[in-house]
Image (cartoon, coloured by chain):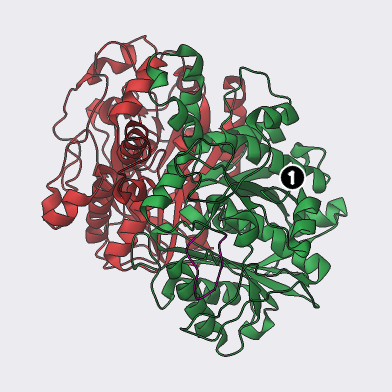
Chain colours: A red, B green
Amino acid sequence: MSKVYISSVASISSQRTFDNSEFLDEIIDHDDTVLSVVDPNYKDYIPPAAARRMAKGIKMGVVASKIALQEAELENVDAIITGTGLGCTVDSEKFVSALIDNDEQYLTPTSFIQSTHNTVGGQIALGLGCKGYNFTYVHASISFESALLDAQLQLENDEASTILVGGVDESGDHTVKIHRLINHIKKEKVKSSSLFKSKTKGAVFSEGANFFVLSNSKKNGAYAELGAVATYNTLAKEDLNEALTVFLKENHLDIDDIDILVMGNNGDVAFDGWYHELSDGSFKNTPQVAFKHLCGEFYTASAFGTWLAAKMIKAQRVPEIVKLNKEATTQINTVLLYNQYRGENHSFTLLHKC
Amino acid sequence: MNKGIAITGMGIISAIGNNVEENYSALISGKTGVSKISQIATIHKNAIKVGEIDLTNEQLEAQLGLTPDNNYSRTALLGAIAAKQAVANAQITNMKDYRTGLVSSTSVGGMDMTEKYFYQYLEDEAVQKYIDGHHAGDSTQKIAQQLGIDKSLVTTISTACSSAANAIMFGARLIKSGKLDRVIVGGSDCLSKFTINGFKTLMILSDTDNTPFDENRKGLNLGEAAAFLVLESDEAVRAGNKKVLAYVKGYGNANDAHHQTASSENGDGATLAMEKALKVAGMQPEDIDYINAHGTATANNDLSEGRAFQRIFGHKTPDFSSTKPYTGHTLAAAGGIEAVYAVLALQNNTIYPNLNFETPMKEFNLVPQTQTKEKELNTVLSNSLGFGGNCSTVIFSKKP
């Protein structure tokens, strides 16, 4: 079985992360309940006429994929695997509202086409002329991890040698509006820097695109080795430690082997308990890191967590802004990422120094 | 890596029947499920025909024993019913005796409720329970719950009209790699105004019965359906002394990389998908006994797919037919229901007629099977081609 490496990364997020030569050097301390991404100059990557027609999710996905391919020094890949919770939700909203407002008349196909979940993966393939395997996973907060697992299996078995894997979601006005109604979004603005002390219900919603080139040969400049990915549709708080123990055992690891625990806390007092189960329990003495105060919450936010883990391993450095406790590590060899959203769709992802 | 993956159970609900037996009986007797739309109030009701399932949401909820406070979309309801049939058919009594996962697929997801309550959400608290049911993964979470699958790998694929074929593919990969012993795979999509109007704007909806591979084809009929298969590893089959219905022998996915919605005229993507599937199966084109074509009856699909047949099979295209005239095009579920039809074809050594065919296309000399035909079948190839250039082929066989 071949080993699987993260050859390159690309992140478009609510922080300035699209430039791979930087690593959270300047932080934006947002103060809001819904965040947008810090846009790269899309025109540097896409002709302006094409960019105008593209939904935001497509634009972010296409540009992130270009950044990742550039860094990996590749013209093309063997496969493209995308994860997205809602796809290009702005176009879905546009098509539904136009359909209702105009009583099913005078509709045009553009927003219908862009609302198809696999439109980002399809557009990336179209741009690259990539005729290879092309899948899109759409399972809430494990959409990205499903894509990652699929890629890992293919690379391990040498069915492909380079795969572009990414998570992308855009925020839409109506989606935000109705999620405020059911209190999935915080009622009060909260600063990024105090998110984890907020003690309120709901999350700070956001958007983003995080893409990676995975390969089964280690290239110069590779970020990390992908050890394992596991997902769970349900996991009660009291079952979390057992699932973790089994996962670590399968990968021949102990708690002590984990140099950093990266967690997907989003400051929602109703659901952060799962994370506390680990941070106050078995990982009490392990350096802990969080990321959703920087990138906000969206179905593929954990791809930003993976970006953070990969960057920390390559740089052998933990930025102050992500530290949750004072525990320090001299060597970053193994990083474990744990994520869930609203108590469902949990995932463990393991990265190693390579 | 080339071992076949066993299929030990299947379930289906479509416009031609509420279970496997009803579907098969309609297929061999040439009974279509395509008719005027009755359950959705759309201004296009006289301009389109659809493959609609006869049961209301209330009837489906009653079948599942759901309480009135449930927030199931029709996609979730149909999916849960078909998946439960598949699990019963595979005689699974304990989900915990093997590592069991679920890979479902959908394109519509909870859009049926979203379009119904889009503005009402803003003022009516009673319907807000459906907000969380919009995203595509929600129906899958509910199906998993109905099946008693917990703490496990449960995911959803959405690659437009090839989705369920891709769910079968990923399920097979999970078993081959040893991640899981048993995976329930398939897809579910209900009819919605969203898809009806979407396809209407693309001008590919027929105003009459769809006629795949016919020179005068006018487009597709939409349909709704759900279908699931139970895939099991050799070890699980052996240990449980399970009856195997058929095997997933090969699979391939490729991208046409030609256009966001249209297929390339020369069928690049479909050709690549069939080539890959044959390679995984370790088979030659002449080993294929029957093709259940994607055959949507759009001008574009049937030309592209027909060209791909010629590129793979030369002048010796095996017997083929499209079952879309029976069910309509059920989008993400199509690869699932057609997988069930492929297995039934193998079990009964029977090829279904391509209904409504009259005139061969002028571009090539391809004539689908138009009568029910009995013939020894060992392998069936099933195609699913979709938006975003997504092309998938799955090969089913009697032998592992």
In the image, is B34 to the left or to the right of B372? Answer: left
Identify the residue under disc 1. B18
The residue depicted at 76 percent of the width and 43 percent of the height is B85
Q: Is residue A93 left or right of residue B89?
A: left
* Residue in front for this viewpoint, B43 or A229: B43
User: The N terminus of chain B lies in which quarter of the figure?
Assistant: bottom right
Residue A327 appears anywhere in the view: yes
Residue at image coords 49%, 39%? B136
Boundaries of the magenta span: B209-219
The relative height of residue B397 versus residue A81 in the rendered view (above or below) is below
Residue B213: in magenta span: yes
Residue A122, x across and y down, in percent: 36, 57
Residue A10: x percent and y percent?
A: 26, 48
Q: As displayed, is residue B158 above or below residue A190?
A: below
Indicate the quadrant where residue A206 lies: top left
Q: How many marks?
A: 1
Q: Is residue B267 magenta?
A: no
